[in-house]
Image: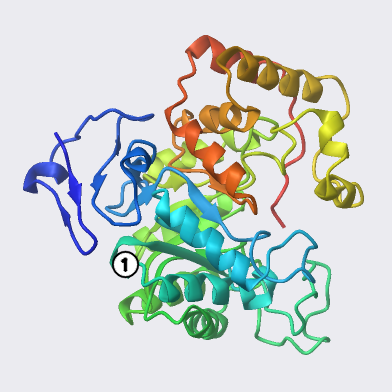
Amino acid sequence: MTYTCYASSLYLPSRLFEHQIVLPGPLDNSFSPKIKMASLTSDTNKKMTYVRLGSSGLTISRIVLGCIRSYGSAQYQPWILPEEEGIARIKAAYDVGINTFDTANAYSNGLSEVILGKAIKQFNLPRDAIVVMTKVFIPVMRHPGDQWLPAMDLNGMGYVNQYGLSRKHIFDSVKHSLERLQFNYIDVLQCHRFDNDTPISETMQALHDVIKAGYVRYIGMSSCFAYQFHAMQSTLSLNELTPFISMQNHYSLIHREEEREMFPTLKMFGVGSIPWSPLARGLLTRSSEKQKASKRGDIDNWMPMYDLTGEWFETIVNRVEELATKKKISMAQITLAWIMNKDGVAAPVVGTTSLKNLYDLLGAIHVKLTPEEMSYLEEPYKSQAIIGHF
């Protein structure tokens, strides 16, 4: 069966929503529409696949382009591309079939949203076909290079009511995000973190109300503990409010703590995972020696994220490299293929400033890993502290 996707509409059989349609792809619930757009080549059409996000009806590309540390201001991080180059990269991602873009109000203190919105407007990309995800919680700091830290006294710094998940901040943040994006609505509004200072009922009602007001289509959550997510989703269900459809959690070959409680919780609620940092800041894309020689590797030396003590980490990296050599593909493709084949994962969020790397990542969509190869990659893993929750 073939689906034909035109620039303004998607023609699907009426019984699609009654039966699962099984088509070629990395997962049984994915499908690959034939896209008829002047900007897409026939070769590209063979590469990108699309999947439903959780149990919702929203369709996203199998790779989500992350805009966190890729497009914005070099004052925020030195490797971030400026506006003109960022706009070109976003267009290139769309041209290869990526229809889903993840940003946040706080990325480059608002500039990431501005660039994404300009790219869509400048190239007249079909808004109806594109999925834009942004976030609320972290404050937008006043200067491009300023970065928020959890320990900051935000009230004392003049950011009263400009952070967290209060009703006031959710509505204000959505308004400002729409202004920066130059949109009428946001496809998926994600809570960037859990707010320990605001009643869950207030947050959930506000999220429901921004949807009812037409500002937002769907809502999602990002890094939190499973019990927190369960409490939020249960509040939504008990009060007949709009539920979360997605969880953007921290998950990769070297950080698999989400498998203990979060993934079973997501499965219970029918929520799709869109993991952040699936390549572990590049640690799983090249040898340890090459990582140390990179600009990002130099910077990350003073902001360590992972406990890499012991032999387990190098063993995993070596096994990724071994399989990549065997299959004659990149380590990044092996790493993404692993995460795409994990139960509950809809699509990983990946960011890159390199067109070469972007095109390489697309190859992961059709990489097949046997159960033995999956186990081979996973076997050395050692449990570690959860990273990313406040």
Viewer-closest of 216 and 383: 216
Residue 146 located left or right of residue 184: right
Residue at the left extreme?
Answer: 14
Identify which residue is drawn at 64% across, 50% down: 354
Amino acid identity at mark 1: Pro
Q: Quadrant of residue 204?
A: bottom left
Q: Residues within 10 Å of mark 1 (few under 14, many from 20)?
A: some
Viewer-closest of 142 and 239: 142
In the rendered image, residue 50, in percent from the top left (x then y), is placed at 34, 43
Residue 55 located left or right of residue 282: left
In the rendered image, residue 47, in percent from the top left (x then y), is placed at 39, 37
- Determine whether 164 is above or below 290 in the image: below
- Determine whether 264 is above or below 212 in the image: above
Q: Quadrant of residue 130?
A: bottom left
Residue at the top extreme?
Answer: 372
Pointer 1: what residue?
126
- Determine whether 388 is above or below 42 in the image: below
Color style of the picture: rainbow
Residue 16 located left or right of residue 272: left
Report how many numbered discs are placed on residues in the image: 1
Is residue 232 among the parts visible in the rendering?
no
Q: Quadrant of residue 46?
A: top left
